Image (tube, grey):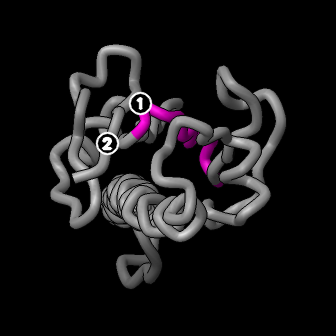
């Protein structure tokens, strides 16, 4: 004899719960990914804003940036993180948390260039679209996943 007063869950209820859990999990993963892109772009923006201030402190006595090297930038702690050898074409540079590279080089006697490379496409476009106080975007095309800045 089969009892009509069974208690428990049937297969449809279990599948519905698993479906809801899957939707919540996927939504959380997408949200965390979007937040990570925003964090990365903001961290880079903050560092790009600070570099001109640091360079002005270091080079204010010399009258120009012709002698600017990444070695000098690294030795005077212009960047907010430790420098590493072989990162930039002209010497050491800074590798950020997610692999982005920041290089600083002279662009004549009275100017310099800040190149941020190793960006993914989304971070590159977000960074190129941002407004900065101390720098302007010189090349924000993101062709080679890099953005080049210069002083205002």
Dot in front, 2 or 1: 1
In percent of the image, x 29 and y 24: which residue is there? 142
Residue on which the image places disc 1: 107
Q: Secondary structure at mark 2?
A: strand
- Residue 11 shows up from this direction: no
Please give the label number shown on residue 58: none
Pointer 2 and pointer 1: residues touching (CB < 8 Å)?
A: yes
Q: Is residue 101 left or right of residue 3?
A: right
Q: Position of residue 81 (x, y in %)?
A: 69, 62
Which residue is at the front of the view, 106 or 113? Answer: 106
**Residue 38 locus on image (x, y percent):** 34, 60
Q: Nearer the viewer, residue 98 or 11?
A: 98
Q: Residue 133, relative to residue 91: is it above or below?
A: below
The local secondary structure at tag 1 comes to loop
Give coordinates of residue 63: x percent, y percent. 47, 53
Residue at 37 percent across and 63 percent down: it is: 49
Magenta-span inclusion, residue 99: yes
Between residue 121 and residue 48, name the one nearer to us.
Answer: 48
Q: Residues within 10 Å of mark 2 (few under 14, many from 20)?
A: many
Q: Quadrant of residue 134?
A: bottom left
Q: In this figure, what is the number of numbered marks?
A: 2
Q: CA distance from mark 2 to mark 1?
A: 9 Å
In the rendered structure, which disc, 2 or 1, sits on the residue that comes first in sequence? 1
Q: List the residue tagged with mark 2.
A: 150
For the point 62% across and 60% down, the residue is: 79
Tell me if mark 1 has few (under 14), some (14-19) or many (20+) residues whose alpha carbon lies within 10 angstroms of its own: some
Side of 37 relative to 94 (left or right): left
Q: Is residue 84 magenta?
A: no
Q: Which residues are magenta?
A: 97-109
Where is residue 129? Give x, y as percent. 16, 46
């Amino acid at each position: 004899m089969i009892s009509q007063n069974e208690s428990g869950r049937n297969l449809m209820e279990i599948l519905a719960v698993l479906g809801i859990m899957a939707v919540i999990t996927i939504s959380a993963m997408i949200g965390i990914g979007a937040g990570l892109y925003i964090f990365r772009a903001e961290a880079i923006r903050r560092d790009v804003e600070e570099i001109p201030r640091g360079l002005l402190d270091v080079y204010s006595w010399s009258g120009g940036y012709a002698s600017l090297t990444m070695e000098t930038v690294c030795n005077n702690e212009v960047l907010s993180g430790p420098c590493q050898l072989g990162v930039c074409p002209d010497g050491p540079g800074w590798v950020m948390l997610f692999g982005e590279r920041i290089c600083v080089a002279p662009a004549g006697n009275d100017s310099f260039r800040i190149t941020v490379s190793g960006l993914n496409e989304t971070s590159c476009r977000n960074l190129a679209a941002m407004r900065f106080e101390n720098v302007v975007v010189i090349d924000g095309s993101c062709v080679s996943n890099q953005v080049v800045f210069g002083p205002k």
